[in-house]
Image (tube, coloured by chain):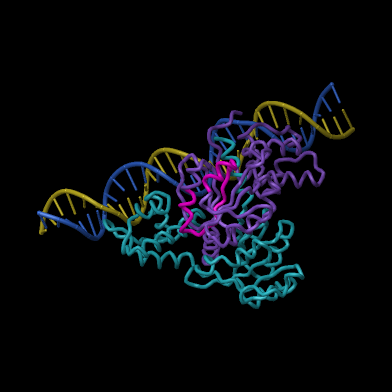
Chain colours: A cyan, B purple, C yellow, D blue
Amino acid sequence: MLRPKSIPESTVRRMSLYLRSLQEAQDAGMASISSDELAERGGTTSAQVRKDLSFFGSFGKRGFGYPVRELIGAIRDILGLDHTWRVALVGAGRIGSALFGYEDFQRRGFHIRAVFDSDPAKVGQAWGGLTVRSDAEMETALREGEIEIVIIAVPAEAAQRVVDRVVRAGVRAVLNFAPARLRAPESVALRTVDMSTEMESLAFALNNS
Amino acid sequence: MLRPKSIPESTVRRMSLYLRSLQEAQDAGMASISSDELAERGGTTSAQVRKDLSFFGSFGKRGFGYPVRELIGAIRDILGLDHTWRVALVGAGRIGSALFGYEDFQRRGFHIRAVFDSDPAKVGQAWGGLTVRSDAEMETALREGEIEIVIIAVPAEAAQRVVDRVVRAGVRAVLNFAPARLRAPESVALRTVDMSTEMESLAFALNNS
DNA sequence: GGTATTTTGTGAAAGCTTTCACAAGATCCG
DNA sequence: CGGATCTTGTGAAAGCTTTCACAAAATACC
């Protein structure tokens, strides 16, 4: 099957979950896995698993299932995880610090190569093997470090300005933790993790049950 | 219009964003706002705004727009934000610490009343006005503190066990930060913030453009 | 080798969500 | 007061995503 221009975002997210389940299956010594079992582990249905995978190709054998090792390789390839990604963190506050130490990023190939902050009291601090740099150097450093992904962990009021600057510096992927809706050109991938909205959605659920 | 049994989750999330935009509009001294302007600020379309609001009632005046103050009150009521929510945090690591200090939660009425950890080295530490408690006390403390929402910030391997325990202790809303798909009964609202999946979705976007 | 069983890949159907488009209600202004 | 303008609320259409269901391909076993 030919890969269509646009893969649903929900499919991409599930691919990431399938990958996790497959790695667990591999650790458990399984050589093959059925769409049914993958669905069970990933919290979805077998038809969904097959449909998702079929966007990218035909990886299974009828009557048998999917070869675990090969499928892991295929999904890693699809998601672009063979490559190591060069990441910068903007904002050296509490959230920035938690993300800097988040081992899952490292383990999955997202390597934080630079940390920026606007607070002179933080600039110069040693973080792991890095030194917190002034945000004035940001554009230059992003280009020199060939940074591909920027994580934003600054207050909401400052977030849009940071996006504008990193986009001008050539970055084409941004993960935002500030509780603000940000604007970026079409060509830039922007995701926002909005923890307050998540909490409000829980409040709504409690309020309506 | 009668409120249907089920409101789309996407509508609920947008309500949270509209509320933010409305508060900004109010701070800017606006008394009324049109669906068009609300859409602009919230990153959606005017038809979407009107449709979303119409799930809950009829708040606007034709030819005029929505009264800012009243609509803020209505959305706060819908989302259940007039009430203060009693929250507990499980996991006193880096992420837990960042969430504990996250002022937006406090500001929006989500008050963290207890912190638990299984590490004896952390139990007894003072966090803000609280003391980190042993996870052995968790069930009792959740019930005694009448905790309504639990935030999980423990390693992936430990997360499912925590969910099972807090659900048994009567908690009906959980926000999970562990990179794991968790299971909970239908009657429990469970949201997962999966930062690694977000990064992988960015990697995919970069890989396919 | 042949028959029963398993499980994929995929069109078609069903179900959801968003967008369209316009009648109806409200304001504005001369 | 009356015509022009604005903007909501909402059915209907369009667009997406998920689920269904089954032919086709592969295995398992006697």
Task: Give the image location of residue A197, x and y in percent.
Answer: 62, 48
Left or right position of A157 against B122: right
Q: Is residue B6 visible?
A: yes
Work out whether residue A124 or residue A39 is closer to the camera in this orientation and state it. Answer: A124
Task: Give the image location of residue B207, x and y in percent.
Answer: 52, 67
Residue, x 69% and y 35% (percent of image)?
Answer: B74
Quarter occupied by the C terminus of chain B: bottom right
Residue, x 51% and y 70% (percent of image)?
Answer: A109
Which region is colored magenta? B138-163
Work out whether residue B196 or residue A203 is closer to the camera in this orientation and state it. Answer: A203
Task: Give the image location of residue B47, x and y in percent.
Answer: 64, 41
Left or right position of A165 against B164: right
Task: Give the image location of residue D28, x and y in percent.
Answer: 19, 57
Residue, x 39% and y 49% (percent of image)?
Answer: A45
Work out whether residue B86 or residue B139 is closer to the camera in this orientation and state it. Answer: B139
Q: Is residue B11 visible?
A: no
Quarter occupied by the N terminus of chain B: top right
Residue B158 forms part of the magenta stretch: yes
**Location of residue A76 (image quadrant):** bottom left
Residue A71 forms part of the magenta stretch: no
